Amino acid sequence: MSTSAAEHLSPAFPERAAWGTAGKLRAWQAGALQRYLETNPRDFLAVATPGAGKTTFALRLATELLGRGIVDSVTIVAPTEHLKTQWADAAARVGIQIDPKFTNRQVDEASDYHGVALTYQGVASNPEVHRIRTLRTRTLVILDEVHHGGDNKSWGDALRVAFEGATRRVCLTGTPFRSDTSPIPFVRYEHDAAGIRRSASDYAYGYAEALADGVVRPVLFLAYGGNMRWRTRAGDEIAARLGTPMTKDAIAGAWRTALDPNGAWIPSVLQAADKRLSEVRRHVPDAGGLVIASNQTAARAYARTLEAITGSKPTVVLSDDLGASSRIEDFAKSDDRWMVAVRMVSEGVDVPRLCVGVYATSTSTPLFFAQAVGRFVRARKRGETASVFLPTVPIILEHAARLEEQRDHALDRPSRPGESPEDAMWSEEEGLLAAANREEKASGDLLDDGSFEALESEAEFDHVLFDAEQFGMGFEVSTEDEQEYLGLPGLLEPDQVSKLLRQRQDKLVKSGRKRRDDDEPVAAHRALANQRKELNGLVAQYARKSGQPHAVIHNDLRQQCGGPTLDRASSEQVSARIELIRRWFVGRR
């Protein structure tokens, strides 16, 4: 192993090192480096959870390859302009000079540099320029968040043209999965037991492992529902409660109404998030918050609301603003409370002091959600926790519950005839994601032509989701209860968070407080919908405990209790399944 400048590389860029890691590589970084140097591959895929330190690993590897004379130059490809500068600054700290201003009009970088930083879009616009550059010298190509190479066929083709002749290629990603089947360049795919081709990493370091190592923060999700009212394009007024069982169209309408800046939901949730930030700052003085908005109009409106709440202007980051990168850097170095962004801070941008987030966007893909949550998980000090405020939307809560799962990119889709229960569940999930994405596009069209109108919204604390378990669900949670959740200390170990949440749950149960609406007559269809929701929640918890897919558990319950599928089961049949799965939790199969 060399004794280059990388020996002193901080494991966290661009700010402070994470807890317990200053002056040395983290265990996973050292392990990945050792595996690379032992196998000496041309292509290497490292999958590491957001916040784990992929930049550090790649730059340490670059110094090794440069120092050993295996390569003479380095090309870094990143998703955004801001990340180009971030990579260049990080590389400079270990003696590698990277030009982030290189353009396709240039033939070569200046002699002062060891290489260049590019964007995927820049490579796609003229891949021949980069093919010539790559062939002129022995080049290491670092593809940051390489899943972007599958964004469309032209981008993937351009990357192959530009970098097929590279001496070495290192691919990095924190979220390798995609909901489409576009192959990612320079990534190896292997058949699994079901015959599906899935991406194969050369080294993987997931969120669960990073959490156990203290590299990332545990995430506390606070879900908010409430009553919504809106007018459809047909002129109908609809009222619904966000968080109760609804059709997909109703969920989309309620969700969009909640995110409307003119309603009461957003101000209430932002105020709660600011209270949570104040509590966290008692233990983490420079802790910051980030609101992720759907579009620029909403972002500006949310910023005005935050200014009214806090008395100070938040930093606003818009993707088409030339000063966006500098504003992110200034915020990262300051102790200001809030930043509001659209997509600029959704991936790769490191602001380690972000501890509180508000997911105020209609984007629902698992990839985007994982990247967004990744902005809050980088741990700098032992015991730091992250808090993310969410709308009570089923697909978003599902992503939150599955945060610790390691998923790969699949190129194939199982055929419908004769598919297994596991494949059926997987296919259903992909269908839901596709439908959700269609809703996003549709919602944008509706908002643009004025045919959708949000009329009224209110926010109500629903429950806390931590470690895939729900706390407070099903109870009438008072304002005092909400304040207890918002007031959890900002420095807690994961087991301490679980202990406090369980104590709070036990207190609710022992209080004898009735479940919501238990004191009022309930229509049969609503009662059955609530039973189905309860059963689905229990199945989700048992799936996490047992490792079985949801579809398999539902099928076992149906076989033992009898009756049709859940959507056609009677109240009595659903109750029997709830009772059965509760016995499973205590080992009474």
Image (cartoon, rainbow, N blue to C red):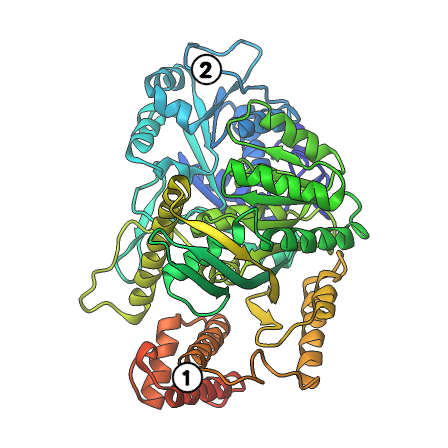
Q: Give me the C-alpha separation between circle 2 and circle 1.
A: 65 Å
The quarter of the rendered structure image containing the N terminus is top right
Q: Residues within 10 Å of mark 1 (few under 14, many from 20)?
A: few
147 lies above or below 244:
above
Farthest front residue?
A: 235
84 lies above or below 30:
above
Residue 8 appears in the picture as rendered: no
Q: Residues within 10 Å of mark 2 (few under 14, many from 20)?
A: some
The location of residue 75, given as percent across then percent down, is 47, 24
The location of residue 133, given as percent across then percent down, is 40, 16
Label 2 amino acid? Answer: Thr
Which numbered disc covers residue 524? 1
Label 1 amino acid? Answer: Ala
294 lies above or below 454:
above
* Residue corresponding to mark 2: 103
**Residue 4's image quarter?**
top right
Q: Residue at 48% across / 60% down in the picture?
A: 393
Asked whether, in this view, residue 134 is left or right of residue 387, the answer is left
Chain-order first, disc 2 or disc 1: 2
**Residue 268's image quarter?**
bottom right
The location of residue 42, given as percent across then percent down, is 40, 34
The secondary element bearing badge 2 is classed as loop
Q: Residue at 71% across / 76% down in the picture?
A: 503
The secondary element bearing badge 1 is classed as helix
